[in-house]
Amino acid sequence: MSELRTLRNHINGEFRDAADGRTTDVVNPATGEVYATAPLSAAADVDAAMAAAAAAFPAWRDTTPSERQKALLKIADAFEARADELVAVESENTGKPIGLTASEEIPPMVDQIRFFAGAARLLEGRSAGEYMEGMTSIVRREPVGVCAQVAPWNYPMMMAVWKFAPAIAAGNTVVLKPSDTTPASTVLIAEIIGGILPKGVFNVVCGDRETGRLMVEHPTPAMASITGSVRAGIQVAGSAAKDVKRVHLELGGKAPVVVFQDTDIAKAVEDIAVAGYFNAGQDCTAATRVLVHESIHDEFVAQLAKTAADTKTGAADDEDVLYGPLNNANQLAQVTGFIERLPAHAKVEAGGHRVGEKGYFYAPTVVSGLKQDDEIIQNEVFGPVITVQSFSDEDQAVEWANGVEYALASSVWTKDHARAMRMSKRLDFGCVWINTHIPLVAEMPHGGFKKSGYGKDLSAYGFEDYTRIKHVMTSLDG
């Protein structure tokens, strides 16, 4: 066995072990073997990171937008220059295919950083005006302060970017905790950023749920931002409420994919399969809950099952695979449990089993014959499992699509423009794609309603979430 890699926290520009020396194992999900250790940070580590961020905030807040833009552009350039290294680390930590990680994650990450670099120079309030005789009012937009951020394990690199880029562009300082199962790429990001930003502006603290709780409950941050489960979001919101912190929550989804009878079935199947199985279905917006008009249901299911059977999962260096393993043993158990608990009326059309005995691979799966109140329809599987339901008309499709607690993303597949517009209005989700599913751009907001949380990632809306508004009124009498 090769020597374990040692990951460390990045606090105030320096790499450090946990103050008490505790560590946690980091597993490669493609092998199930430990390949690194990371700090299991406790209160002393969180205190140190928060102190560093707080000390760095006044100077970073007072930088000009052009200075912040310049720094973020340098970070984007550095990401591009070290792309191969970032991909290698991410792939080892997550098992993701190397080629797809390089082509599907690095370019949007770099683009998103550059978008927020540009957004830094567009931050403004309303123009000055006289709304009371003898008084002039202006509105200032200011950074909120220190931001405590918790990233998930499904896209460790990209979610780190979604967290730090808007916060830093707006003039905030950051303490970011990666998932305890995927800290490696975030630690590398800290190394890259550490040579560009002033000390204390960007800090990384590794650890578990308790570490995250300590960050959110710490008195220093003005804002807590988390991407994770509904359970975690509820806990964060409750903890933050004790001292009235701002909260930004992205908590998962159960995206409906509504396929009408006039759809090009072959194209829809091909696109939906990719959007459902990419990253092993470990995506809050994944196309995993398909509702198909009854007149094309059987044909659609047959074609989807065949596509699933032809879809490959496997090693990161295999160019023919669409996705790698599930992230961890607990996630494999969760996905397996959903399939094992299927009701008698459900039918597994493809997959439904683990692949191999090494690592956490799971076969592309299609399940039909489901009812609206079935567990697998109502709850997020977060695995390579696509469910299919048959609907009779548009009203039923809307009722079932909206009939879950999540409200992050959705899609409609039809050639009827009027129907597409009606559906986009009626679907209760933060995003509605039409005849496509899953593309994201930096300029457009990403975020949901209901138990999918609140606040937006990406876009000017996501940028504004990291600012506060101040009214300044001055007398014209001197």
Image (cartoon, rainbow, N blue to C red):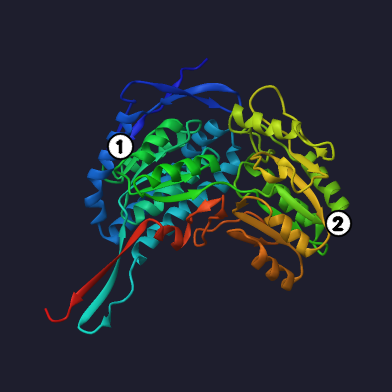
Q: Residue furthest left?
A: 478
Residue 381: percent from the left, percent from the top? Answer: 66, 40
Q: Residue furthest top?
A: 1
Please state which of the two labelled residues, at mark 2 or mark 1, is closer to the viewer. 2
Residue 255: percent from the left, percent from the top? Answer: 66, 52
Secondary structure of residue under mark 2: loop
Q: Is residue 390 visible?
A: yes
> Which residue occupies 52% across, 42% down?
228
Tell which of 200 and 253 is nearer to you.
253
> CA gap, disc 2 to disc 1?
56 Å
Instruction: Judge left or right: residue 410 versus residue 59.
Output: right
Tell which of 309 and 3 is nearer to you.
309
Disc 2 + disc 1, Cβ < 8 Å:
no
> Which residue occupies 33% across, 30% down?
43
Q: Is residue 229 visible?
A: no
Instruction: Judge left or right: residue 348 versus residue 60.
Output: right
Residue 197: percent from the left, percent from the top? Answer: 30, 46
Residue 88, above or below 100 = above
Q: Which mark is residue 294?
A: 2
Q: Could you tell me the amino acid type at mark 1?
A: Ala
Residue 390: percent from the left, percent from the top? Answer: 82, 53
Using a 10 Å C-alpha cutoff, classify the residue at mark 1 as few (fewer than 14 neighbours), some (14 to 19) or many (20 or more).
many
Q: Residue furthest bottom?
A: 133
Q: Could you tell me the amino acid type at mark 2?
A: Glu
Q: Say which residue label 1 marks.
A: 49
Tell which of 317 and 7 is nearer to you.
7
Instruction: Judge left or right: residue 472 versus residue 400.
Output: left
Residue 357 figure quarter: top right
Secondary structure of residue under mark 1: helix
